[in-house]
Image: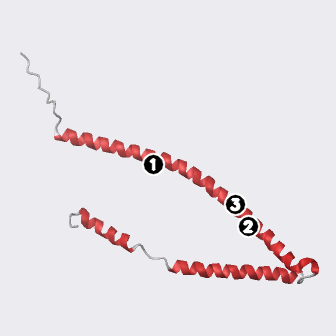
């Protein structure tokens, strides 16, 4: 009669912890791979979108230049209006005025920017909460 070790059908606590650790590690690895593949697709679409926006901005700039010339010639009105040099100077002054107005509004908006105070305060509380003092 041989005495073979009896195998316990119930896994030990250590084995369960190791299995859970392995499964969590595998899950995290798979989640990272999924995020990378999704991000790769998003970056590609974002790059194409940014390129198209750049092309649209360039065409809009050309359109503004053409509109500026057209407005100057409209003010000139085939010699019946102001001299051509004054017409172009008026268009230039309108753009400088518009740029100044946009800069003023932008400056007022930038002055309204504040630090995320609540998020900073909560972030400071995280170490205490992890130590069990929260």
Image quarter (top left, top right, bottom left or bottom right) of the N terminus = top left
- Distance from label 2 to label 1 (Cα)? 38 Å
For marks 3 and 2 on the same chain, the one whose residue lies earlier in the sequence: 3
- Distance from label 3 to label 2 (Cα)? 9 Å
State the image quarter where residue 93 is shown.
bottom right
> Does 84 sit left or right of 134 as displayed?
right
Q: Which mark is residue 56?
A: 3
- Residue positioned most to the left: 1
Residue holding disc 1:
35
- Distance from label 1 to label 3 (Cα)? 31 Å
> Does 102 sit left or right of 59 as displayed?
left
Assign a secondary structure to mark 2: helix
Residue occupying image coordinates x 67% and y 60%: 54
Disc nearest the viewer among 2 and 1: 2
Q: Nearer the viewer, residue 11 or 56?
A: 56
Find residue 16 and report its horizontal and vertical position in percent: 21, 40
Callout 3 crowding tier (Cα within 10 Å): few <14, some 14–19, many ≥20: few
Find residue 28 and report its horizontal and vertical position in percent: 36, 46
Q: Nearer the viewer, residue 71 or 103?
A: 71
Disc nearest the viewer among 1 and 3: 3
Residue holding disc 2:
61
């Amino acid at each position: 009669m041989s005495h073979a070790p009896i195998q316990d059908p119930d896994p030990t606590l250590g084995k369960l912890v190791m299995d859970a650790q392995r499964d969590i590690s595998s899950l995290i690895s798979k989640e990272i791979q999924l995020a990378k593949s999704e991000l790769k697709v998003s970056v590609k679409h974002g790059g194409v979108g940014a390129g198209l926006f750049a092309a649209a901005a360039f065409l809009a700039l050309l359109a503004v230049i053409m509109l500026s010339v057209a407005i100057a010639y409209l003010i000139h009105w085939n010699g019946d209006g102001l001299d051509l040099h004054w017409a172009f100077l008026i268009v230039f002054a309108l753009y400088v005025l518009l740029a100044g107005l946009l800069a003023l509004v932008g400056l007022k908006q930038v002055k309204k920017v504040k630090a995320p105070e609540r998020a900073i305060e909560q972030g400071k509380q995280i170490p205490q909460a992890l130590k069990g003092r929260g």
